[in-house]
Amino acid sequence: MNIFIRHAAFKVLLVAIIAVSILSCSQIRKLTYPEDFTYLEKEQVKTLMKQMGDSVGRLGQLVANDAKSETKQQQVLTELSTIESITARLSGGHEQTNQIFIRDHIEQFISDVGTAKLYVKTTPPDYSKAKKITNSCQECHQLR
Ligand code: HEC
């Protein structure tokens, strides 16, 4: 075997070893966590809540006046989608008390955000439900 082939063979072996080790790691992860399980620490919940708060803040500013431009409609929809994707992350894994609490109340909130989106998509856009999203936050927070 000349030196070049040896070198190539070694590379192939190396790649194979790396591939196998990556694969086996993900196999082990699969054993410890089911695939759709997302465990959220208290701190992560807080971070996500803060992001929702920021988004709700922007949403509030957008719907504060009655102007009905197309850009505004798009921006409002963007914020609602941001909130929606955060709720999707919040509704994962329910091991801790705060998460069990979230599980019991997030459905209503998700549906409120969905309704708000539908209203905004009408022509002309109706921002009344989007304005009330803050109330939906409070429904959960008052209970605590
Ligand atoms: C499904 C219930 C639920 C909904 C809906 C909800 N929250 Fe929360 N929120 C919680 C829980 C539970 C905590 C406490 C997290 C902890 O301290 O463990 C929290 C904490 C927070 C915090 C405090 C974070 C910190 O640093 O302590 C803020 C701010 C917040 N939420 C904002 C919002 C906003 C804004 C909305 C609406 C977009 C909202 N929440 C909707 C359940 C909810």
Image: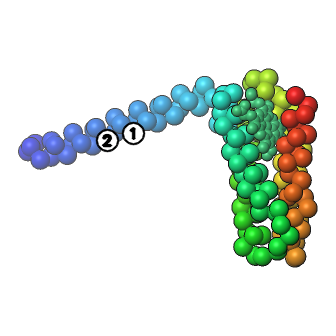
Left or right: 111 as drawn, with respect to 32: right
Residue at image coords 40%, 35%: 20
Instruction: Please name the amino acid that badge 2 sits on.
Output: Val
Q: Secondary structure at mark 1?
A: helix
Q: Quadrant of residue 62?
A: bottom right
Above or below, 117 against 122 in this view is above
Left or right for 21, reference 139: left
The residue carrying mark 2 is 15
Most foreground residue, 15 or 50: 50
Position of the C terminus, as image quadrant, is top right
Q: Quadrant of ligand 1?
A: top right
Say which amino acid is labelled 1: Ala
Q: Position of residue 103 (x, y in %)?
A: 83, 34
Q: Which residue is mark 1?
A: 19
| Residue 125 in sight | yes
Q: Residues within 10 Å of mark 1 (few under 14, many from 20)?
A: few
Q: Residue at x 74, y 45 (%)?
A: 53
Q: Tell me what residue is drawn at x 16 percent, y 43 percent.
A: 7
User: Closest to the observer: 22 or 81?
Assistant: 81
Classify 10 Å Cα crowding around label 2: few (below 14), some (14-19), many (20 and above): few
Q: Residue furthest front?
A: 65
Residue 128: give x, y in percent of width and height.
91, 61
Marks 2/1 in contact by CB < 8 Å: the verdict is yes
- Quadrant in which the N terminus appears: top left
Which quarter of the picture shows residue 31? top right
- Number of numbered discs overlaid on the protein picture: 2
Seen in the picture, residue 35 relative to 133 is either above or below; the reply is: above
Q: Secondary structure at mark 2?
A: helix
